[in-house]
Amino acid sequence: MIVKQIKLSSQAKDRLGRLKGKTGIKNWNILCRWALCYSLREGTIPTDVAINSDSNVEMSWFTFAGEYSDIYDALMIAWCQEMKLPTDDATLAKYFKLHLERGIAYLSGTNFIKELDDLILLATKES
C-alpha cells in the first residue's frame, strides 16, 4: 500500500467531474486509475510541485486500487526503479500523488476525450 488515504486537489476534482460527464464513468477511483496509468506511460518524472489536497474527494488506497493493489504497487516501484529513484515509502507516495494529479490534468486537458470510446482508444494507442 503506497498511501492510506488519497485526497485530491480542488482542481483535480473539477477535472474529474468533466471527465465523468464525457465518459459516463461514475466512480472517481476508476478515473483515477486511468489517470495514474496514463501519467506513468509518459516515461518522465512529473514536476515536483506542492499539491493542495483541498477537495472533498477522498478515498482509501483500497478504494483506489481495489483487488489490483499489488499491481499498482508494482507499477510505482518499477517506475521509480526505471527513473533511478529510491523505492522507499515516502518517495513512492510522493510520486504516486504527482502522477495522479498529472494524469488527471493530462486526461482532462486533451480535447481528444469526448466519450468513453476515446479513453479506450487512448489506452490502446501505441507510444
Image (cartoon, rainbow, N blue to C red):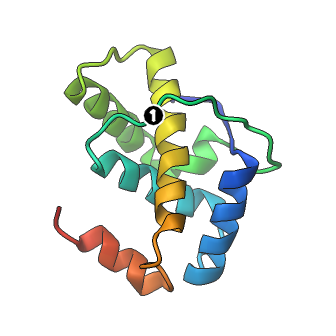
Q: Is residue 78 left or right of residue 21?
A: left
- Please tell me whether residue 94 is drawn above or below residue 105 in the rendered image: above
Q: Is residue 84 left or right of residue 59?
A: left
Q: Residue 108's quadrant in the figure?
A: bottom right
Q: Position of residue 50 (x, y in %)?
A: 62, 29
Q: Position of residue 78 (x, y in %)?
A: 26, 32
Q: Which residue is at the front of the view, 49 or 74? A: 49
Can residue 115 be seen here? The reply is yes
Residue located beneath label 1 in the image: 47
Measuring from the top left, give residue 120's x and y in whole percent: 36, 77
Rendering quarter of residue 84: top left
Q: Quadrant of the C terminus?
A: bottom left
Looking at the image, is 6 positioned above or below residue 14?
Answer: above
Task: Name the residue: 56% across, 30% down.
Answer: 49
User: In the image, is 71 to the left or to the right of 78?
Assistant: right
The residue located at (64%, 64%) in the rendering is: 16
The image shows residue 30 at horizontal and vertical percentages of: 55, 62
* Whether residue 58 is visible: no
Which amino acid type is shown beneath numbered disc 1?
Thr
